[in-house]
Amino acid sequence: MGKELQIALRMTVVTLLLTGLVYPLAVTALAQVLFPDRANGSLVMVDGRLVGSELLAQPFKRPSYFQPRPSAAGAGGYDAAASSGSNLGPTSRKLRDRVAADLERLKTENPEAPGPVPIELVTASGSGLDPHVSPASARWQAPRVAAARGVPVAEVLALVARRVEGRTLGLLGEPRVNVLLLNLELDRSFGRGGGKR
């Protein structure tokens, strides 16, 4: 019985070292060599100042900026430490009221927007932190952004078109626009949108 216990303990230690130490260190080192930006959180710096991550949505309230999808992550939304959906279903009165309020707000804030409000602008993603919107949702917001910045809508639409990311590996997912990167491009092209985002 003692010999079997020694073998079991040795196997436990070896497995612990391999899977708990060697493997994570090897994967981390490989990621740092092959994809250092992604491995470090895809952080976005502007003038030496951290402004966010390409991987996490953040709120943009000013009319001169594009807005991301709503967020249920944390008490005020967009909390990276509390990534989650609301878990509210289609029969939830709270969800219906929130969506109705968001629809009215978006229609009021975007009077020149073409067509109905895109569904993704009133529905949160599963994580509550999706940093992307569809190109159609970005184009829908373009008239508001252009008016707030005093630039032609065509120039804002051209900027949106340049920021569209294609499908991953050419076939996975849908074309999308990263809201943070689009808003930073707006600031570079037309100057800061004024005040706090």
Image (cartoon, rainbow, N blue to C red):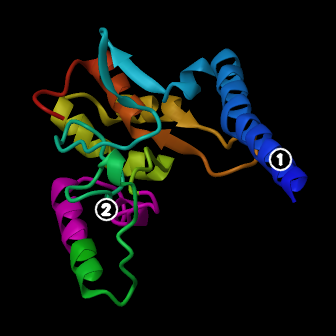
- Residue 184 left/right relative to 196: right
Counting from the top left corner in percent of width and height, residue 11 is at 82, 45
Question: For mark 1, does the 10 Å Cα neighbourhood hold few (<14), some (14 to 19), or many (20 or more) residues?
Answer: few
Is disc 2 placed on a helix, strand or loop? loop
Q: Within the magenta stretch, is there residue 112?
A: yes
> In which quadrant is the C terminus drawn?
top left
Residue type at numbered disc 2 = Ala
Q: Say which residue label 2 marks.
A: 72
Counting from the top left corner in percent of width and height, residue 143 is at 28, 44
- Residue 195 left/right relative to 197: left
User: In front: 64, or 75?
Assistant: 75
> In which quadrant is the N terminus drawn?
bottom right
| Circle on res. 95 | none
Is disc 1 placed on a helix, strand or loop? helix
| Residue closest to the far bottom | 91
Q: Say which residue label 1 marks.
A: 6
| As drawn, 134 above or below 123 | above
Q: Which residues are magenta?
A: 101-127
Question: Does residue 169 appear in this view?
Answer: no
